[in-house]
Every structure is written in structure tokens, then in C-alpha cells.
Amino acid sequence: MSKQDCESRGAGFMASHANQFDNLRNVIEQHFERYSTEGKLCDEELLSVLNGKASALIVSREVTSTQQYADMLYSLALLNYESASYDQSARLVDGALKIREEAGGPRADLLLDFELLVLSYNNRGRFAEAESAAHSWLRMAEDEFGVDHPYIGKVTFCLAQIYRKQGRKVEAEQMFLRSLSTYAKTNTLDSPDAAVTRTAYGDFLRVTGRNEEAKQIESND
């Protein structure tokens, strides 16, 4: 963006920002779709360019749909997450989350934002932030679905993993058990998410020397 663009302050300035936003959004959507369908990520150099342009266009929020802006940030955050750029992922998805919260965005999108934020913090070892975000995520999920819903099993599993990484064994086990209990109550113990919880809890039990319990959990008896 040139100095002349910045000084114009007129319709041309607004359109320039909108066009830049649309162009960036289209590029990100293309790579996000390619990742979703083919598992192919942006290379590191391109991802860095996209991150820089997204940051520079924050000022354009007033000329774009807040939902479109949040969607773009989420897509870019996920590309960063899958590239193991967890700090950048957290920054971007936190931005998307704040925009949606301010705009009263759809609960389904807010839940996705919280999930990615928690995973980004946890994978970066930022456990206090991960735990805080996970509790907010859990409260929203309970408000949306109630306490007995398979989705709650997913959220409590993430909390178990956060506690486990910190060596907080009692709290971790409580959350593993709550996750499995939720799947049992909702007749979804055979679901892929429940299987992930069983495997992780089995590993947890083995580390604590409880091999027989681990076998029982993993066999889904």
C-alpha cells in the first residue's frame, strides 16, 4: 500500500483495502482447501508471507464482513497449526475468537476457535493459557449441548491431556474418567473420539503401573 493510498482517505482507499482482503482471503482459502482435500500445506516461505499480509490488513476490518475476516484468520491459523507454528496459530485463532465474540458469532464457529486455541497453546507448552481457554470452551459446550453429550467427552479429554503434560495426575485421571463416562452415557463408546480417549488413558495407566486396568480400558469392556 502506497503513501498516496494512505493519504487519500476516500472511496478508493476503502476499495483498495477490500480488494487486498479479498485477494488474501482467496489465496488462503485455496491453500486451506488443498490441505483439507489433499493434505498438502503451504511451504514455510509462503506461510510467512500470508501471515504478514494478514497482520497488515487488520486495519481493514471496517470494510469487510467480520465473519469473513474471522473465517480467514481461522483458516490461516489451522494452516499454521498443521505446520507446527503453534504460537502463530494461537495468535491468529485468538483474533478470530475475539472478533466472533464481539459480533455474537455462531456458537459452532466459536467452539471450533476454542478447540484450535486450546490445542495450539497445549502443543506449545503454554499450559496455563491452554487450561484457561479449555475451561471457557467447556463452559460454552455445556451451555450449548448440556453436560451429557459426546462433544463434552472431547473437551474433557483435552483437559485431561493438559493436566497430564503438567504431571497433575489426579486431575488428569478425573478428566479421562469424565470423558469416558460421557461417552458411556451417550452410547458412543465405539466412536473414534472415545477410542482416542481410551488409548490415551490406557497409556496414562501404564505409566502409573496399572497395567491390568489399562488392558481393561483399551479392550472397552
Image: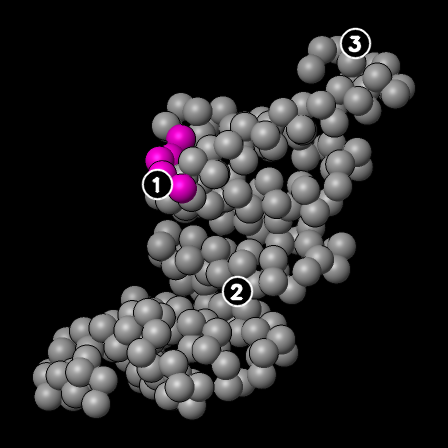
Query: Please, is residue 180 above or below residue 29 in the view?
Result: below
Majority secondary structure of the magenta segment? loop
Give the labeled residue for mark 2.
133
Q: Where residue 121 sits in the image (x, y, percent)? A: 43, 56
Q: Residues within 10 Å of mark 1 (few under 14, many from 20)?
A: few
First-in-chain label (1 vs 3): 3
Residue 4 marker: 3
Residue 139 pos. (x, y %):
58, 76
Which comes before the other along the chain, label 1 or label 2? 1
Real-space CA distance between mark 2 and mark 3, rounded to the nearest whole angstrom: 42 Å
Foreground residue among 27 and 52: 27
- Residue type (three-letter) at the residue carrying disc 2: Ala
Q: Residue at x 75, y 36 (%)?
A: 64
Q: Between marks 1 and 2, how big is the CA–CA gap?
A: 28 Å
- Residue at far right of view: 10
**As shown in the figure, which amino acid type bears the numbered disc 3?**
Gln
Residue 194 among magenta residues: no
Secondary structure of the residue carrying tag 1 is loop
Per the image, the residue denoted by label 1 is: 39
Find residue 45 and report its horizontal and vertical position in percent: 40, 23
| Image quadrant assignment for residue 179 | bottom left
Question: Magenta part of the protein: which range?
Answer: 37-42
Query: What is the quadrant of residue 171 in the picture?
Result: bottom left
Q: CA distance from mark 1 to mark 3?
A: 41 Å
Between 153 and 7, the one lying in front of the other is 153
Mark 2 nearby-residue class (10 Å; few <14, some 14–19, many ≥20) = some
Q: Any magenta on residue 40?
A: yes
